Image (cartoon, helix red, strand yellow):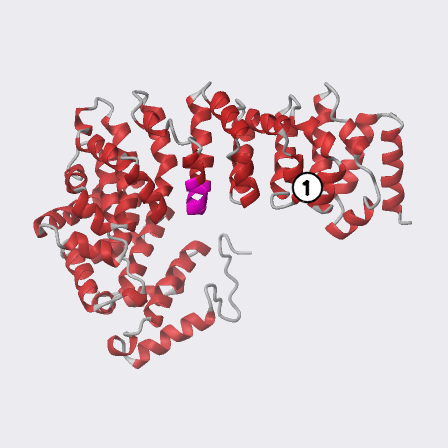
Amino acid sequence: MSTIDVNIKNLIENIKNDVQVDHNLYELKIALGSLNSSQLSEGVAGVQLGFIFDCLNSSNRKQVLTTCDILTLVLPIKPSQVTLSDYATPLVRALGHPFKEVKEMVLKEFNRGVGERELITLLNSNVLNLIISCLCNEEISVGTRAIEFLTKLGQTEDGLNVICQDMFVRQLIMQTSQSDVYKIRMYQVLVDISVHSPEGLGKIESCGLFGGLIDHLKSNDVLATMAALEVITPLVGTVHGYDFLVRNDIINLLAQQIASFTDNPLASLVYPGLARFFGHIGREFPQRLVALYPQVLKEVFKGVDSSDVNISIVSLETIAFIAYSPPGKAALYKQDERVMRHVMGKFQEAVTKLPTEWRVRALAALAHIIHLSVDHITSDITKVSLAWFNQLGPSALQNIFEMTRQPFPDIKAAAFNVLEKIAAHRWGQIKIINHPGLFEFLLDRSTETTLEGKQAKYDVIKTLYNSPTISSTFEDEQCDRMAQYLQEGVIYVPFGNHVAVEGAD
């Protein structure tokens, strides 16, 4: 037996015999924490953990937290089904512990056990009530753990059956009715399960758990409405989720709200969530957005002219989100040409004149506007991107070039991101090669001292070199230089030079 094993054994015996429990728990935590996973497995092999769980039965906060740390170390060493079977009673008791750290530890262990038969066996009405109480706990960290567990549970067939049983549904509705915060947590669980599968959505809808969602979206409480909007938005990303929103008239409701948002004295709070919601619809189903909700697109286009910078930037982001895909670009291109020309002018103003925080967001949105993956580049769509880029004005590329040389990391990174998206297009490659000093700047490693900056440059060169149009755009010598740059890697220091790179190990 090793010295470590002897030490651990002695500490365990002292704790079992109620000898200086607080001190010995702390020493046990240190001893176990110093072991690697295989040593830890050997160190606690054959040790029954009931006596450790018993140490949670104390009003001494220090003792309870140390015990929690020990259990967090040793429980994952054992197979989940063993833990759930052997320690069902102390785990359930711990779930009702007054300290949040203990509840979180148990929920984490339950989460690990999702998919095991032993967990489903454990989930009787008492345990389920305790879990709902955790979901409705005033501590955000406890509520978050409960959301994670219930979501993962509901994404399994047996777990979904548990969540949709009458007793659980009644208790869930009753306990979450105490607070809008708790309702939002419930809806987050339900939406995450529903996004996972059409079966999950169908079962949750049929048992009435989405019943209060529309009322929540109609609430006069702006914060509650914003939270509900954020929670339901992922449903738009799936066909079955979108169909659910249409079937329950939720999209029409929100379309009416965005069409009249200027009448709301809290418009700047309400509008961003609505715009992002429809931006997601536009990204997934651009033709439907244009055909079925033209009033929404009209309001978003108007939003770019708002004197409220939050509304104008969110409007630009929403348009860019729609334009991210080829169908989205095509749908926007079919709008009045003057509208997108005006929008691109607003982009140019935003990326050059606004404070840094807003410029970074505008640059990220501009990257979406220009973006096209190589396998989606067609002559028609690339013409759309070129037309929009040219509408930024004759100094657009020079402005982006200058931003890549600024000392502000956020602006620099966002500008390089735009440059990388430009580099994917043949028209962009031509602009880069013809712009004075830009190609040489990209190949000059000395301008970047941070790992992020070096990576950003590397990504632009990689996009240029991997383009299918490289041979028709660049000369052989230029291609060779890019190939050498990529071969040398993100960080390259010539032999004999030792340069510290911030952020690199």
Residue 248 falls in which quadrant of the image? top left
The prevailing secondary structure element of the residues shown in magenta is: helix
Q: Is residue 448 magenta?
A: no
Query: Relative to 250, does residue 499 appear above or below in the rendering?
Result: below
The residue at the point 44 percent across, 37 percent down is 204
- At label 1, which amino acid type do we have? Glu
Where 182 falls versus 123 (above or below)?
A: above
**In front here: 297 or 216?**
216
Using the image, determine if residue 12 lies above or below residue 290: above
Q: Is residue 378 left or right of residue 145?
A: left
Residue 41 drawn at (x, y percent): 78, 48
Membership of 197 in magenta stretch:
yes
Q: Going by the image, does 287 lie left or right of 204?
A: left
Using the rendered view, name the quadrant where residue 401 is placed: bottom left
In depth, the one of 250 and 184 nearer the eye is 250
Q: Nearer the viewer, residue 390 or 89?
A: 89
Left or right, 345 with respect to 33, comes to: left
What's drawn in magenta, residue-wise?
193-202
Q: Is residue 424 visible?
A: no
What residue is pinned by disc 1?
118
Q: Position of residue 229 (x, y in %)?
A: 34, 33
Query: x and y percent of residue 503 in the render?
Result: 50, 52
Residue at 45% of width from left, 43% of height from top?
A: 200
Q: Please tell me whether mark 1 sits on a helix, a strand or a loop.
A: helix
For mark 1, does the 10 Å Cα neighbourhood hold few (<14), some (14 to 19), or many (20 or more) residues?
A: some
Q: Position of residue 202 (x, y in %)?
A: 41, 41
Asked if residue 263 shows in the view, the reply is yes
